[in-house]
Amino acid sequence: MISVKHLSKTYRNPDGSSLTVLKDINCEIQPGEVISIIGPSGTGKSTFLRALNLLDPPTSGEILYNGENILAKGYPVHKLRQKMGMVFQNFNLFEHMTVLENIMYAPVKILGVSLAEAREEAVSLLRKVGLAEKAEVYPSSLSGGQKQRVAIARCLAMNPEVILFDEPTSALDPTMVGEVLSVMRQLARDGMTMLIVTHEMKFARDVSSRIFFMYDGYIHEDGTPQQLFENPKRSATKEFTQRIRRAVFEVGDDFDFPGMFTTMTRFCIKNNISQYCERVEKISKLMLTDIMAAYRPMTVRLNYKEIADEASLDFMVEGLDHSPLDSTSKEKIHPLCREIIEEPTSRGFRVKILL
Ligand code: ADP
Ligand code: MG
């Protein structure tokens, strides 16, 4: 369906300097594939999507769409954009039009669909994204998650063959990420061909047929989710996919507990693991004010390994050569966790509690 060969993109800045963002991108995409594009920010993921639908033409290389060279002079760009929809991070809805008008606009103006037909289709698409009751309101009255679902419905109204998503959930409040991802999951199940730039690793792993890891201007590694997440061949891929998110606290004599719990709660919400909030707080309180009260200063870390979906709390004391836990204290912690790991480190001792 899409074949990309030796694609490159160099941005020339007004001051004469230049930046080569895409160096040599090669890939083949088959109908029905769901491909997640992951990688650190600034590695050209958005540039790649924009090159594919000609919002930002590449410097060199070839893009074939259903066998046709879309970079050839005179290729009808508007035809391509009908077949290749795009959903942006910031929704880009028309604020002065109702939700229904947003969805009807392009089919009527560009495809020449009748008003009645466009309306019927728009209503059915709104139902599909769970927003049937919002047809007559303006985008300003919607939440971010709802706006993005409208943007997806608007994109579907053009009946595209493939949809490009550029970080569709990164502008959303964490509580609204799920509703957008579930609409996308449904599209994937329906067989829509999708290219999704995302930082939602669990989603990428569950929903994708393939993953592209972009790094340094190349598709540095590609493969099934299992290959990339569980058995990456290259070290940069490994570092990225198996990274751990952390909140770190240095706990001294006078320490701001409420501040720490607030940060911990934010961390849990941000990483979509609010189910751990309560236990994180209980364990921390127990450890800091009771079991390990005599071991300050210490370092507390709340860790989350996204791919393994594994959260843990570390309590680390420098210069300590034995475990601060006795059997009574372990009995207190056990009901709150999956496992307690007591281990010496190069600089002291660590109690790791798996949540
Ligand atoms: P990603 O989506 O992976 O975060 P982008 O494709 O947005 O990365 O950007 C890659 C690099 O290209 C960044 O360093 C960015 O600053 C640069 N870049 C993006 N768009 C432009 C532009 N229009 N002009 C100049 N530089 C740009
Ligand atoms: Mg981007």
Image: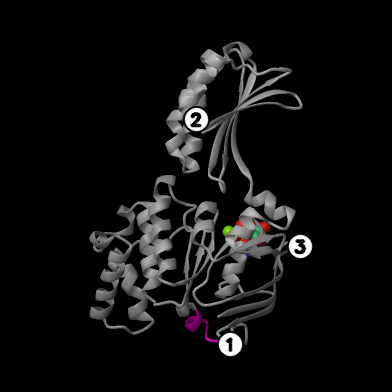
Q: Amino acid at mark 3?
A: Ser
Residues rendered magenta in the picture:
73-80
Q: How many marks?
A: 3
Residue linked to disc 1: 68
- Residue 174 vertical placement versus 112 (above, below): above
**Numbered label attached to residue 17:** 3
Q: Is residue 250 above or below residue 51?
A: above
- Mark 3: C-beta under 8 Å from nearest atom of ligand 1: no
Image coordinates of residue 310 in percent, x first then y, are 55, 41
Camera-side residue of 173 and 39: 39
- Residue in the foreground of this view, choosing between 87 and 269: 269
Q: Residue at x 43, y 29 (%)?
A: 278
What amino acid does circle 1 point to?
Answer: Glu
Looking at this rendering, what residue extends furthest in the front direction? 327
What residue sits 39% from the left and 61% below the top?
183
- N-terminal of the two: label 1 or label 3? 3
Q: Is residue 135 left or right of residue 300?
A: left
> Which is in the foreground here, disc 2 or disc 3?
2
The answer to whether residue 93 shows anywhere in this view is no
Which residue is disc 2 drawn over? 337
Q: Give neighbour class at mark 1: few <14, some 14-19, many 20+ (Cα, 10 Å).
A: few
Q: Is residue 327 visible?
A: yes
Q: Judge from the rendering whether residue 5 lies leftward or rightward of residue 148; answer left or right.
A: right
Q: Nearer the viewer, mark 1 or mark 2?
A: 2
Residue type beneath disc 2: Cys
Tell whether position 352 is magenta.
Answer: no
Q: How is the image coloured?
A: one colour
**Label 1 lies in ligand 1 vicinity (Cβ under 8 Å):** no
**Residue 51 quadrant:** bottom right
